[in-house]
Image (spheres, grey):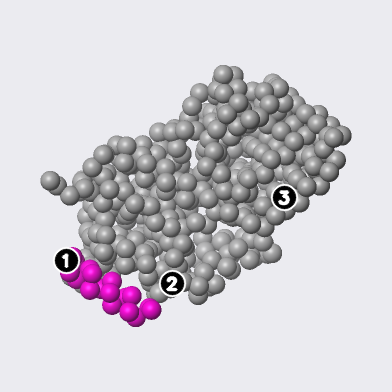
Amino acid sequence: MAERTRILVLTLSFGSGHVRAAETLAREIASQDARANVRVTDALRESRLLFRAGYVAPYWLMLRHAPSAWRWYFARRLEKRDDATAPEWAFMRGCPQVFDEIARWRPRVVVACEVAACEMAAAARRRGLTDAGIVAVVTDHEAEPAWVKREVDSYAVADERVRESLIAWGADASRVRVCGIPVGREFTAARDEDEIAAARARLQLKADAPVVLLMGGGMGPTRMGEVAAQLCRADAPLQIVAVAGHDARALRGLARVREEHEARRASSPVSLRVFGWCDEIAPLMRAASALVTKPGGVTTSEASAAALPCVLFDAIPGPERLNARRLVEAGAAIETHGSRETARATLRIVGDDALRARMSACSARLARPGAAAAIARIALDVAGGSSHESPPRESSRGEAAAVVAAEGLRRRTA
């Protein structure tokens, strides 16, 4: 019996979107080819403390305390056409488990769902640890030069603008395909009154009061607590469902808001439910009247698939700003600044049936429900060898050589 084709979907959990995209693609690949053996790996999960301190922590510190510094830094990377987000040695020493897994498990394809994942997969090819094809999946409406690697066999991008950017930075035009951003099939169910009612009944939400879904991107930084507090002051019936993801700080803030609101609940027509990580995002989007969120690429694509109007806040400088602009220009979202403005825009949408219907229709027109299926087909094509062309290696590419190289790497970085 032939061995099953091994496909590694590699990501880094900077927020929840990259992880959801990776899991969506893994499911889609498996559904298209029952013989595929698909594995999802989060490179940050077992990365070394020094890597997190030097690569991850500065990112979050800038976003939380100095967003203007991140804006300058990201713009500078684009201007200088930086071809890496970190030196190759930093990835190899900071995330040795990734390179060890690639060498030992011997995937036929690595699907990279984050820029650093793409850099690691390319480094593994250059080091002779693998012959795997590489499919780079850009899950925002802006990319950066670090995505462009000669080892990449195929790029799957969100739109034509991203495609043109990658080509301008040196990517082979024949390898860059516009697919959209991958979202799960569960988000594409019909959004009619029956579906909305069924979703609300499943989630134990009232059928006769608007539902606002409040999300913060999985890991922050975000002012979800401030937005929730403002929404809790509404004088009309409103059901708020806040999902903080893995952002413990946001979860604590939301819990405080809920406690304060419960103390005066008898005089308020507003309810607030708070969750950390939640696997029920698709039903929540079907149940919601509006989504209030940071404009991550995956989250906003899920909202479009669900035909959901959006109120956007706290956009991270760089890709999230372009994600927000795209939705606003299409009439599918309102971008806001400050928690009071966010709350006012939200209450305006849920209180105006005609506005909500128009925004819902605009949101639906942006949807690319076939994105995940298209990217899965690309990955399977590369696995079958139809697109894969291996560049020269620095060392032998046999299985034994790969394992020996990985063992040497592990000992040097232990």
State the mark number for residue 4. none
- On screen, residue 272 versus residue 37, left or right, reads right
Helix, strand or loop at mark 2: helix
The quadrant holding residue 98 is bottom left
Where does the magenta region start and end?
397-414
Which residue is disc 3 drawn over? 255
Which residue is disc 1 drawn over? 398
Which residue is disc 2 drawn over? 94
Query: Mark 3 or mark 1, which is nearer the start of the sequence?
Result: 3
Up the image or down, 74 lies above or below 186; here it is below
Considering depth in this image, is 59 or 231 the residue closer to the camera?
Answer: 231
- On screen, residue 364 versus residue 336, left or right, reads left
Up the image or down, 52 lies above or below 248; here it is below
Give the residue displayed 85% in from the left and 35% down from the top: 266
Q: In which quarter of the image is the C terminus?
A: bottom left
- On screen, residue 280 versus residue 350, left or right, reads left
Q: What residue type is labelled 3?
A: Ala
Up the image or down, 14 lies above or below 162; here it is below
Residue 31 in picture, x, y percent from top left: 32, 37
- On screen, residue 358 versus residue 104, left or right, reads right
Give the residue displayed 59% in from the left and 34% down from the top: 284
Please check the rendered image and state whether residue 226 is part of the magenta-colored stretch, yes or no. no
Query: Mark 3 or mark 2, which is nearer the start of the sequence?
Result: 2
The quadrant holding residue 120 is bottom left
Q: How far apart are marks 1 and 2 (CA)?
A: 25 Å
